[in-house]
Image (tube, grey):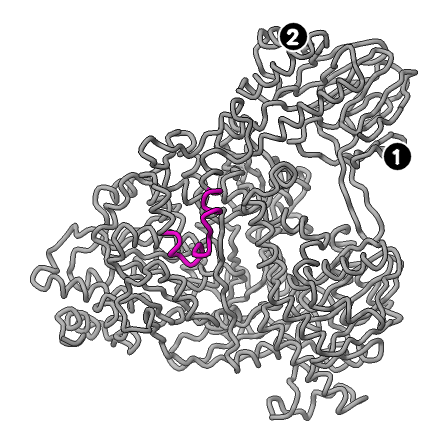
Amino acid sequence: MQPAFPYRIREQQLWLSPDRCIYWEEEQSLIVSDLHFGKTGHFRKAGIAVPQSVYKEDLLRLLCQVQYFRPRQLLVVGDLFHSRENKELSLFLKWREDFPDLGIHLIQGNHDILHESWYAKAGIGLSRETLSVGPFSFVHDINDIGGDAGGIDGHAASGKGAYYFSGHIHPGIRIRGMGKQSLQFPCYYFGSDYAVLPAFGRFTGTVSIAPAPEDNVFAILPGILQIQ
Amino acid sequence: MTLKETIGYKTIAAWMTAEGRQPFAFQEETWEHILAGRSGLVNAPTGCGKTFSVFLGALIDFINQHPADYQTRSGSGLQLLWISPLRALAKDIGRAMEEVIRGLGIRWQVGTRNGDTDPNERARQKRRMPEVLIITPESLHLLLAQKGYADVFKPLKIIAVDEWHELLGSKRGVQVELAVARIAGTKAGACSIIGISATIGNLEEAKEVLLASLGDGLQEPAGEHGFIVRAVIAKPIEVESILPDEIEKYPWAGHLGLKLVHKVIPILESSRTTLIFINTRGMSETWYQTLLNVCPDLAGAIALHHGSIDMELRNWVEDALHEGKLKAVVCTASLDLGVDFRPVETVIQVGSPKGVARFLQRAGRSGHQPGAVSKIYFLPTHSLELMEAAALKAAMEEKLIESREPMLLCFDVLIQYLSTLAISDGFYPADLFTELKKTYCYREMTEDEWREILHFITAGGVALQQYDEYRKVEIMENGLYKINSRRVAMRHRLHIGTIVSEPMLKVRFTSGGYVGVIEEYFISRLEPGETFTLAGRNLELVMIKDMTVLVRKSNAKKSRVPSWNGGRMPLSANLGMMLRRKLDEASQMMEDTPGMMNDKSGMIDGTSGEPDIELRVLRPLFQLQAELSYMPRENELLIEQIETKDGFHLFVYPFEGRLVHEAMAALLAYRLSRVTPISFSFAMNDYGFELLSDQPIPLDDSNVYELFSPEALTADIQRSVNSAEMARRKFRDIAVIGGLIFQGYPGEYAKARHLQSSAGLLFNVFAEYDPNNLLVRQAYNEVMDQQMEERRLRNMLERVSRGKMVLRWPQRLTPFCFPLKVDSMREDLSSEKLEDRVRRMQAQLR
């Protein structure tokens, strides 16, 4: 396993995992986004034969991360599940049973459309829009935060207010070399007021972002590499 | 009884005489084959009675079968199935057939069936099938998706496949093979199959592909497998290049050729109607605008015709062409096929037609009066392209017409076809396998592959048993393979077909009225208020709503011309060969008369031994090439290495077409990267390719032969960095055809957004989690066969390794490398900036 990359922000110690999640040391929390569990199942049910091993390995990877960092809780910044309930989610429930003491808190994303009772049954705490823990706040889509944070292209004044962790856009960073070479990788984005996590699920694409020079961006190569 | 003694022949001949017509020899020959129930191929160009060669034959046969009551018999059921690649053709062909039927006073009906056929008409056809059904390959497969389809084909006598040369070599051709095999299968081979094809290099093979599923059932003399009837109709073709006045000032790179527009006007004026063929839709828009700007008098007398323009407008243009109302039409391949426009006297081809067959076909669109000459002008879009005119002329003289290679083992089409059969009557794998093994496309399919396909459509490949809900084809208790889900069946019906297009949006006026379609990629980069050109109109973008682009008319002077990402055609092998020969002649010319300045006066064009006029005009360019670098002979491969501020460039000129060059570039890059760690980017055009690196490229006299060796070619190509990227691109079409991606129908799938994914993502997922999946394998195979054109690449390497490699280190960009250099910049720069930069670079060269 590639080592996690240490990163400090707002006097908190973070570890950026090459497996697409962040361990927040002070709160013993694993922050993760856009897992899209159940997605392959929905495709397959519609007759689209996507290999289901993508999902299996996503679950396995999450298991490894939980065993490695031993977090108290998972903070999921949205899109934990892809759509309505299907059989694949039963596999998740089985997975969940193996970690009865692990807290899971979901900040709902646009894909999280299951009934509230389902989350309760699965032992998943819910926040509809945002959640604040210590100096950090959590939201699925940063564009839903009016005013002080703004979109990824519009940077508001820094240093004041909460620092947000978000997901939703599945960020990727394009790296250009001489001789017109170009490569794209999923990445972590840290702006002055908010961060965007890469999508955890592997059956997801990336959308390339255009960070400002003062932003910090870490590409997942598969190791972690700070781009800027 | 011979043909001419039959009552059918006499009846038809009498009708023709009354109409002032006379049967052609090839038509009578075909009729004889039809009466004998044989299958085969009719080789005839457009506009010389090919439709009648089959249709009248079918009528003669019918009259002979029912001599007493042929005029009163109705409801005979489907007699003639007419498969045609173009919807637009159906209307005209149907009209011609109905005219005969009326003239003979028989009670046949002619029906058409394609994407435009309304549901009422379909329902009528279901109750009473017309005697003749004109259908596209896609609609034919939709027919096979109907329960009880076999009944429709019971009375069928003849399957005619029109424009077979167009279909062959594409996945639509494979669809035809499959449908023909199925229909023949329901009738135990009791029908004849007749293909109609223009001249191609592999007519014999074309026939074999089409008739393959008849197997041994052909009623032929021993040793012969189906007939070929050739229409011998000689129509003289005259080719003339439009020459720049000063070749020194004509651009070295470019793709529009607008600098020669002033030479086009007199041609338009002196001809009744002219077709101007442009290679892409975007460029045709620009040409149309420019013609109007240069010669405002043409307003109303010229029109634009391409595939993204509203069908109604296109129909209007075609009608106006028929009636001789238009002076000129700027068009793309959209007017390659179809019935003839009699008023057309002249054709202008702008830019390279990329192949001899296409050039001939376009030339043949002019001069239909008896005894008239087909006149075609070639307008080069950059200097070096003039050489292609000389090559085209020589290739036409030697009848070097391209072959259309049939596609093999298209699993994506097969998967789609199996689902089609599974939603109608279902299928039994053992029977179907036997039938498929008879087709040309799938005759090499192994039982393992067949099992894999069946597993894929029933179990969906790699799965987590108890957590899986995969549902598509189900195996019934009696072993029948069947799709039972109505939703799956409905979605499948909407996606039958093999034509995969870029995501397109409809363009409408805010006030209502449809303009055409435009690529999502292009429009997504525009802001509301910006203007663009479509269908020859300047339009202001108002907004994009529900997959529709709303626009209003604009009077803005400047507007953007859309790009359609459609694939760029590569130069054919035949034309490439001729081009190398012409280059050799040019080099010979430079050796024979060095230092002689360009002098057009006093030279007589066409005299034997004289180089072509095009080559003589290009002399100053060749001179500069020779001074800066080298003019290669036919057995030589020129390699240029140049350093600029962009990095280190390596240019190679095999003149083999862009696809082979792309493969060659990847291969060379791979082999060089084994010498030393190094990264490249590639650019290629039809003449050569470029490798660009940020460090010096380790290629010199010591290793150049090794780098171009044909040894270990297959293995090296497979390892070459680019093959995954190329396979990814191929995978898009395969995934759509194979049913992994649903192309957006506006509004249709708003509810199914959670089932959207991109081909790139799917490819990544399959490549990583199910790398042996047969659709992924197919993508790689298609890369090898079509993209890499491995056979052509190998031929090229063998040719080069027998010849001489010439290495040069020019101090400046040369006329040969210039178009490549410009092409490679295209990705990053907007068109305006590019122009500026090209101009600046060209100035530096002088």
> Residue at position x 74%, y 52% from top?
B827
Q: Quick one: SS at disc 2?
A: loop
Q: Are marks 1 and 2 on the same chain?
A: yes
Q: Is residue B455 magenta?
A: no
Give percent across and percent down for residue B438.
Answer: 37, 56
Give percent across and percent down for residue B499.
Answer: 49, 49
Q: Is residue B448 magenta?
A: yes
Q: Is residue B178 above or below residue B844?
A: above
Q: Chain of mark 1?
A: A
Q: Amino acid at mark 1?
A: Gln
User: Quadrant of the rendered structure where residue B463 is?
Assistant: top right
Q: Quick one: SS at disc 1?
A: loop
* Residue B552 shown left or right of residue B191 in the figure: right
User: Quadrant of the rendered structure where residue B232 is?
Assistant: bottom left
Label 1: which residue? A228
User: How many numbered marks, from 0 up?
Assistant: 2
User: Quadrant of the rendered structure where residue B684 is?
Assistant: bottom right
Q: Chain of mark 2?
A: A
Q: Nearer the viewer, mark 1 or mark 2?
A: 2
Disc 1 crowd, CA 10 A, few/some/many (<14, 14-19, 20+): few
Q: Is residue B483 above or below residue B65?
A: above
Q: Is residue A183 above or below residue B459?
A: below
- Numbered badge on residue A123: 2
Determine if residue B529 is in view: yes
Give percent across and percent down for residue B9.
Answer: 17, 72
Q: Which residues are magenta?
A: B435-453
- Distance between mark 1 and mark 2 Cα atoms: 39 Å
Q: Amino acid at mark 2?
A: Gly
* Residue B594 shown left or right of residue B106 in the figure: right
